[in-house]
Image (cartoon, rainbow, N blue to C red):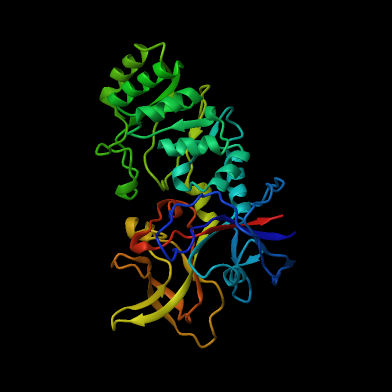
Amino acid sequence: MAAATHLLSHSPSLPKTLNHPLTQNPFSKFPILPLKPSQNVFKRHSLSIKAVLSQNPAKTLTPTFQHCFTKSPDGFLYCEDTKVQDIMEKVEKRPFYLYSKPQITRNVEAYTEALEGLKNSIIGYAIKANNNFKILQHLKKLGCGAVLVSGNELELALRAGFDPTKCIFNGNGKILEDLIIAAQEGVFVNVDSEFDLENIVAAARIAGRKVNVLLRINPDVDPQVHPYVATGNKNSKFGIRNEKLQWFLDAVKAHPNELKLVGAHCHLGSTITKVRELVLSRNLNLIIEPGRSLIANTCCLVNHVTGVKTNGTKNFVVIDGSMAELIRPSLYDAYQHIELVSPAPPDAEVSTFDVVGPVCESADFLGKERKLPTPAKGTGLVVHDAGAYCMSMASTYNLKMRPPEYWVTNC
């Protein structure tokens, strides 16, 4: 089986002058960059980087817990059957995101198998987690729907070919213009507030179509997650509290020509770790909204070590990646596993480091108190679980360019 690495997106280097627009077409073509075959200890394969993606590979069931990133016995990191070091040597020397297309497929298949007993269930991928257009197209081909929280996400989902009747427009600040598009396309819409309901009614009248709505319930439950991603407690800006539920039920009934109540929506927060088996004894259709669990483990941020320093108290590994490319550790104090791409020299001292970037902020770190072999300048270093809420939250702070994205396909 041959493995190929394909360009998903790219932010060009800063132009020498600002006399022409900096905005770029996100779907523009790039020349094919051939790579030499990589010598894998497991098998031989050919490796190439292309701007145009290959067709979706044939669907095959994969063993449980198979993962795309592995270390070979000689200490090199692989993405599927592709040596990450080989990719680093053939692409522009800057931080980049590296995805596994097969891992995305495996993650969706795991959800599909789990929902086999539930008729008409929808895997509504949370586009906010990662909005790469090629990834969206792949998820659509795998049968996913989409959960949207902005007009641009709605437009992108439609452009990627998602079935509008498997899309859900969510959010606490939906504007009329976007709701009109949702109504015209037949998208489900979650009701979040009184003014939201008024806008949905207005959109239905303008579009001349009845809108299928769900009431977003705020049950005041503490999901025991980071407060920034807790969305179902009494202090949250999202949803309808129980004491106001009857008012909304009556309001929907009062607009039979504009609204059809089809369900209830509830979102407690991200990274819920306590689960409980639920028996669905009624004829219910289930819509779920996975984001991180579909895409996070499919990707790593690949960086280059700029140098190692100490201030007498702490040791630092300074890399070219930063909070601009990946803000979750700084914003949420998130832990993401960090490791070197290649084996360290036998005499490399193992020390405890903070892994930091070049951005002019003390909050610019990718990991703290990490035990690593002391890396040489230029060594590759990856931050794992970077597929969700990383590139979609990346910025150009300190005028850093947004990183390119590649994915590995087995073809």
| Residue at horizontal 31 percent and vertical 78 percent from the top | 314
> Residue at point 51% right, 77% down?
379
Residue 238 location, quadrant: top left
Q: Quadrant of the N terminus?
A: bottom right
List x then y, in percent, for residue 286: 51, 30
**Outermost residue toward the front in this view:** 19
Q: How many numbered discs, if any?
A: 0
Q: Is residue 29 above or below residue 81?
A: above
In the figure, 293 relative to 160: above or below?
below
Left of 279 or right of it: where is 197?
left
Instruction: Locate residue 13, reporting x and y percent.
Output: 47, 64
The answer to whether residue 124 is seen in the rendering is no
Find residue 216 and report its image quarter.
Answer: top left
Reply above or below: 400 against 262.
Answer: below
For the C terminus, give its image quadrant: bottom right
In this view, the residue farthest toward the bottom is 347
Horizontal and vertical percent position of residue 254: 34, 11
Q: Quadrant of residue 357?
A: bottom left
Q: Toward the viewer: 276 or 384?
A: 384
Residue 245 visible in rendering? yes
Q: Residue at x 70, y 72 (%)?
A: 41
Q: Position of residue 352 (x, y in %)?
A: 39, 77
